[in-house]
Image: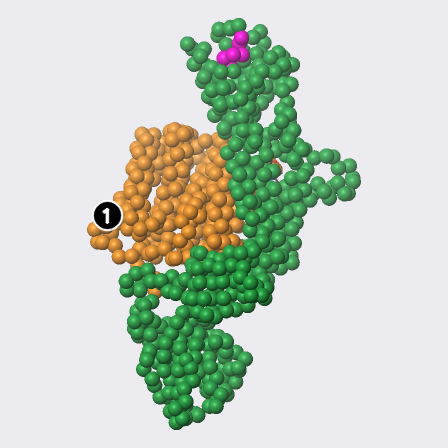
Amino acid sequence: MTSEDSGLPERPPSPGIPYRQILNFLSSMQLGIILLLLLAVISVFATLRPMEEAIEHIYTSWWFIGIMSFTALNLLLCTVERSDFLYRQAFRPNLQLSAEAIKKMPVSRMIKLKRIEADPLSGARAAFRAGGLAVRIVDGPSGPLLFGEKGRLGYFGSIVTHLSLLLILFGAMYGALTGFETGGAGMSGGSFFVPEGNFRVNIHEVKMEYLDEEGKVRPRAKSNVSVTRRGEEIGRQLVSINIPLRFEGTAIYHSTFLWVAHLTVTDPQTGRTTGPLKLLPVRGLYAEGIFQAARPGNLRRELPPNTYYFLEDKGLYLLARQFVPDFLTVSAERGLVSRSYKPNRPVLSYYILVEGGPTPRWDLLELGVPKVVETVAGPVQLELSGFENAAVYSIARNLGRPYLFAGAMLLLAGMYLSFFLVPRRFYAVLDGNGTTLAVGGRGYRNKLLVEQVMERIESYLQQKEGN
Amino acid sequence: MPALIEVAPAALFVENLFFRLATAAFLVATTGYILNLAGKKEWGSFASQALRIAFVLQTAFLAIRGINVERVPFVGHYEFGNLFIWGTVLVYLWTEWRQKDRYYAVGAFLLPLVLLYVIYVNLPLVNPVHRPLPLVLRYPLWLNIHVSTSVLGYAGFSLAFALALMWLLRAALEHKKNAGQVPLIFRAVFQVLPQPRALEDYMYSASSFGFLFQTAMIVSGSIWADASWGRYWGWDPKEMWSLITWFVFAVYLHARFTQGWTGFRTVALVAVGWMTMMFTWLGVAWLLPGIHSFG
Ligand code: HEM
């Protein structure tokens, strides 16, 4: 029996040569199955842990990457070892088949011919054609042999699939080694530098686009962004959700928008004003817990930049806590509650902190309504004098993208070849004194289909005989 | 502040009506297939007819739902679940149409599975509210490919699992038969259950169908995520579990084809594969946190 049915690779014998044995093991399906199961089991446990932890301790650990590399090696060796066999399988079919051999095929029939024609194989040829096969007649050991086949490319399904997986793994590795992922944010007129890519992102304007009358639907933020390197522009675009700015294998994605409060501070005694200070509310940026970590005593170290202003002469920290555009009420778990996204009634909540002092309670400011508050350093007048929006970006470089994409498409093609282009071969010779037709068929992977095609061939022949 | 879509009461009524009718029709079809399996042959074609009607009702329900939410209905468990039911029945009806009435026995195993999914979308905890699609997800081409391939992948795996159940029942009855004690009610069942080998061949076909579409789902999902979030793979639990399902079926396909595994071991792999698939769909959302919580 050829290995056409079992698919078991023909392997060179390994008479005690360790290197050959090691190679055979490394390219074996057993190892492949073990590795796939191992990856599956590890992944199950990994998903039970918080995602960041799993990424840090499992998915990017040396041993997980090691298992993946082993899988890649296994795939590569297996593909190399097998390609020759599959090539012969596809292009050098064994046509030296006797009637006996045909009868022993996985699917076979002995069909009695009632009428003897001049060319007894012609009926079978038509039947094969009706079964969708490409047909030819060759000389076999027991006379002319009718050979029909279809789906020859299907033999290469596994090779294409495996090579595509290697391409995907390569693309992922290349992308990971040459790429980066980072973030950045800014308001109109702001800019920030991305050291990983050695470029500066300049935000020329941030606009809000409301999608409905009442502002109930989250609006779309659009920002006009340019990218420069040493003053030279290398990219420019209106960035918004799902419309990233792409350049040099890098993309700048809009990830969210924030409200920025403009706070004006006046000293009631001297009448001196500071501001407007542009502050990012901490609650919009971080969970309340992070603010809790920034206990007085650690303020300078713990407070995120742009979220506070230090009033030097008074020793006070002004901290923007939460901004809502359309204030409705205050809820215990959500803080300020907004009616909509439209700035109908902007309200800011804020803290005044003193280094080493107790955690204070927060208070509210309405737009354009100044408020004098008593502090340990005397009275201070605060006013929410305006607001604007900041855009938050995630920035990623991935040079592996073209390989990943090509690999993915090739993967689908390979699977299509594997599962839907089922190679099938049929053989027919006249048996005995020419009154019986021996028809045999075999497929690659799919006996069911061979059986169906055989039924079609048989019923075609019987119909013809009946006429 | 996820705003909801306001649906006119009449439109809501029609939507719910078709949903209930489809549920009832699935119940009837399931009963028919089971009676057919139990030896009441005349119920076979009735069940098949009922299933076709159920399918038409489900299609109508999804179309109305789509009109009411102004998009393809696949957001959240309610919509995706219903789409998944639709896809599973579509794949089954297609195979039944090709295999004719000898395939009714498979229906007696697949339909209870479908009914399980139907019961799930009927549960009060599955919220049927009408929500607009979050902006970040609006990437029509890849999104639609992602959703339709996932439905077909899940459908293939469900069919494979139904065949695995058939195989298991047959094996259990075979065992009893050898001991000479098949309960009377199972005599008829035993008669119509196909040979284990044939079941395994069907199981292989259904699994490879599911596997192809599961692959397409992962690929299109990655491309979509890359376009929307700037990363094609985020290691989030939903992604990981779809990959785990993919691994399990890859092992099954290799074990069967290359290693020549047959019988219980392959059936067990398909069963495990179906369980991981179910966990990807339900377990991840209810038990594990992640960014895929929208559905
Ligand atoms: C891990 C190492 C792997 C090894 C050593 C391996 C080896 C093999 C071998 C020897 C075959 C035989 C079929 C033939 O030659 O035509 C095969 C088939 C196949 N492999 Fe792999 N494989 C591996 C991983 C994978 C993975 C991860 C996938 C992705 C799903 C995959 C997809 C396929 C497909 C689709 C087929 C055709 C299967 C069938 O017809 O049932 N392989 N593989």
Q: Quadrant of ligand 1?
A: top right
Q: Residues within 10 Å of mark 1 (few under 14, many from 20)?
A: some
Residue A10 in magenta stretch: no
Residue shown at 37%/29% (left/top)?
A: B101
Q: Amino acid type of disc 1?
A: Val
- Disc 1 CB within 8 Å of nearest ligand 1 atom: no
Which residue is painted at 44% across and 74% down in the image?
A280
Q: Residue at 45% across / 14% down in the picture?
A: A462
User: Looking at the colours in the rendered structure, which chain would you say is drawn in green?
Assistant: A
Displayed quadrant of residue B87: top left
- Side of A97 relative to A221 (left or right): right
Can residue B5 be seen in this snapshot?
yes
Q: Is residue B199 above or below residue A75?
A: above
Q: Position of residue A314 (x, y in %)?
A: 46, 90
**Nearest the camera: B57 or B269?**
B57
Along the viewing direction, whichever of A124 and A223 lies nearer the viewer: A223
Magenta: predominant secondary structure element? helix
Which quadrant holds residue B113?
top left
Residue A179 percent across, percent down from the top left: 59, 58
User: Could you say where residue A455 lies in the image, as x and y percent from the top left?
Assistant: 47, 22
Question: What colour-coding does the image apply?
Answer: by chain
Q: Is residue A415 visible?
A: no
User: In the picture shown, does residue B227 fall above or below A423?
Assistant: below
Nearest to the observer: residue B148 or residue A246: A246
Q: Which residue is mark 1?
A: B14
- Residue located farthest toward the left when viewing the structure as drawn: B10
Q: Which residues are magenta?
A: A119-124
